[in-house]
Image (tube, rainbow, N blue to C red):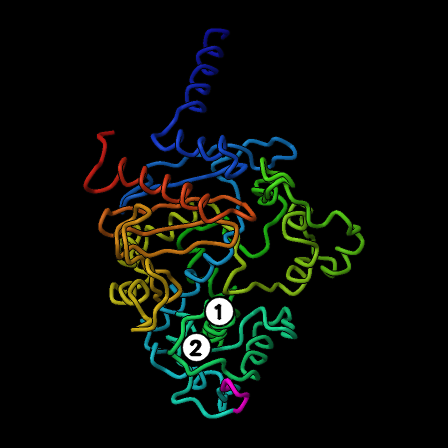
Amino acid sequence: MKTLALLSALALASISHAEGPLQPVLQSFVDKHLVPGVVALVASKDKVLDLDSAGYASLASKTPMRKNAVFWIASMSKSLTGAALMMLVDEGKVSLDDPVEKFLPEFKGQQVKAADGSLHPPKHPITVREVMCHTSGLVLANEKGLKKTQSLKENVALFASYSLRQEPGTKYEYNNCGVDTGGRIIEVLSGMSYSDFMQKRLFDPLVMKDTTFWPNEEQASRLAHTARFTADKKDLEEIKQDKDVEQRIIDKWSEGVHVPRAVTADMGAGVAFNYAKHFGEPAGGFYSTAADVGTFCRMLLNGGMLDGKRYLSEKAVKQLSSIQTGDTPVSPDSAYGVGFSVKLTDEEGPSAGSFGHRGARRTAMWIDPKNELVMVILVERFDMTGEEQKVMYGGFMKAAVKAFGKAGKQSR
């Protein structure tokens, strides 16, 4: 029995210390104080090729980062919304060229505000394509006096009450209000709440069991906590955004719905209102894991199909992953599709034509059709400099392409 126990312990130790080819790269990001911890996944059309982690989920408690850690993926949510909307395009319920006012009458009569403050009708009403690729001219989420609620219907009606910032289709302005409007169109056309549609049409069928707006206590126990620079900018420290809020206040705001304290610490006590109203923002509210994000990306790499089930037509995947901004410039190295950024260069590793998204706390995913790879890197970090981002994204993705890309696979 002692011999069996010893052999079992040795086997477990071997598994726990086994390193994939990317683990040293991930550890280097921790060692350089770029991130407190990281989880990364690389997959092909057929399977996960590597899933590894390094560092800490919590700097404060020195909790090791687990491969199934839960992250706030922020604006990566836009891509989930884009895919959901394209399901309705496949069903013939909406076209990207349709005016938004066709489905949301509150947008009828919206005016453009000129530089001199005068108002005039737009040359054309904003379209579904324009709200999903950030060229609509809608009010921005940081507009002074814009007070959103825990109701997508109310929020979008509020956006419609503002004048357009410029002629639709003439300028790229990254815009959460536009993608939230796309989410509201999903509600109107499906007859379901946005969150129910996402759960029933995407998350349940794809078995994305940890993708949610409202992590429960078990999921919160796996939450990756966010870090920022220390005052001297030489190291990182964990943030705690609810330290001055008593539990009774959180319970009041959540209307009795349980909110894990780990979530309020990371996101602020105001998240309790979202739990109370079961509200989630299409443009940036989801939490997820590397495995869940990888599954979603593999479906897209497979042209809209996974494990024998079709979620999107190949045509829909091509639309959401191709440039929808026309001649309107976005940046030297990227354009924008339907809820997805589209790469124009190979600079960071993935080939031109790859598509994906980043999140506010530096999470990222890329689908690279040329190299036949999915690449996901999840971290939670405030105030990461542009140079630090280049080191992290470029280091991970170039290593992933070298190790697993179609042109440079290692024999495994």
Give the residue at x 48% y 69%.
Answer: 175
Residue 275 at x, y percent in the picture = 65, 59
Task: Find residue 321 and report its image quarter.
Answer: bottom left
Counting labels gives 2
Is 44 rendered above or below residue 78? above
Is disc 2 placed on a helix, strand or loop? Answer: loop
Residue 234 at x, y percent in the picture = 58, 35
Task: Find residue 339 and report its image quarter.
Answer: bottom left
Give the residue at x 65% y 65%.
Answer: 277
Is disc 1 placed on a helix, strand or loop? Answer: loop
Is 352 rendered above or below residue 280? above
Residue 382 at x, y percent in the picture = 56, 48
Q: In this view, does 225 lie to the left or right of 10?
A: right
Is 277 rendered above or below residue 170? above
Label 2 sits on residue: 136
How many other residues sit within 10 Å of disc 1, few (<14), some (14-19) or many (≥20)? many
Q: Can residue 112 be found in the magenta stretch?
A: no
Q: Which amino acid does label 1 sit on?
A: Asn
The region drawn magenta spans 113-118
Residue 49 at x, y percent in the picture = 32, 37
Q: Can residue 114 be found in the magenta stretch?
A: yes
Give the residue at x 71% y 59%.
Answer: 254
